[in-house]
Image (cartoon, grey):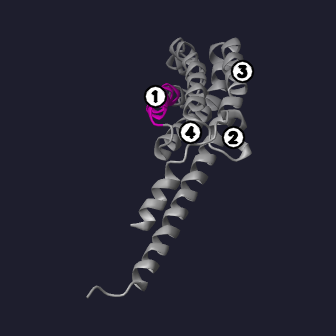
Amino acid sequence: MLSVALYLSLAFVPQSPAPAASTQSGGVATPWDVRRMLDSLQADVQKLAPLLDQMNPDEWVRRGAPYSYVEQWKSSKTELGYFQISARSMAKRPEQLSLVLDTFFRLEALDRQLGSLIEGVRKYHNPAVADVMQAFLNEGSRNHDQMRQYTLDLAKDKEHEFEVMDSEAQRGRAVISRQPPAA
């Protein structure tokens, strides 16, 4: 019982407020900072939807483009949708590591898909649209870096919580094992 009480007192200590951009100082960003970062990421990603919608990679194939651009385009649209869903879920529970990891990995996958698709857009669609997409990747790197740092900070924080729980459980077992048996 002692270990549970100590764990509860440690687990619910409020986090010190730290903006998402300065989580490197050792703290995990606050939920409202994470939501602000997610809102910014979602707004940036949402700007890609109309660009992807105006593309017709099947037409590119008819003009000699490899079919892989069709697959990259489809994957980009799919990843964009998955990222939006994942980010909305994460915004509701920014402290849940599985949601944070899913959102981060979706963002990474979207960036990879777009990076591959940009050359096809440049060559077979419109170089200006390719430039806009490249600018998105370049400008989004700040939010992307914040997301990466938050993911790392949260994982470290969860590991620390687990270590504290394990240590307290071991201490509790030691206390219980030293007690004399009940008569």
Q: CA distance from mark 1 to mark 3?
A: 24 Å
The residue that disc 1 covers is 88
- Relative placement, left or right, of 94 versus 65 is left
Q: CA distance from mark 3 to mark 4?
A: 20 Å
Identity of the residue drawn at 44% across and 73% down: 172
Mark 1 or mark 3: which is in front? 1
Identity of the residue drawn at 58% across and 52% down: 157
**Mark 3 Cα-neighbour bin, 10 Å: few <14, some 14–19, many ≥20:** few
Q: In the rendering, at what x and y percent does residue 16 appear? A: 63, 41
Which comes before the other along the chain, label 1 or label 2? Answer: 2
Amino acid beneath label 2: Thr
Q: In the rendering, at what x and y percent does residue 38 appear? A: 56, 28
Magenta span: predominant SS is helix
The residue that disc 3 covers is 135
Which comes before the other along the chain, label 2 or label 4? Answer: 2
Which comes before the other along the chain, label 3 or label 2? Answer: 2
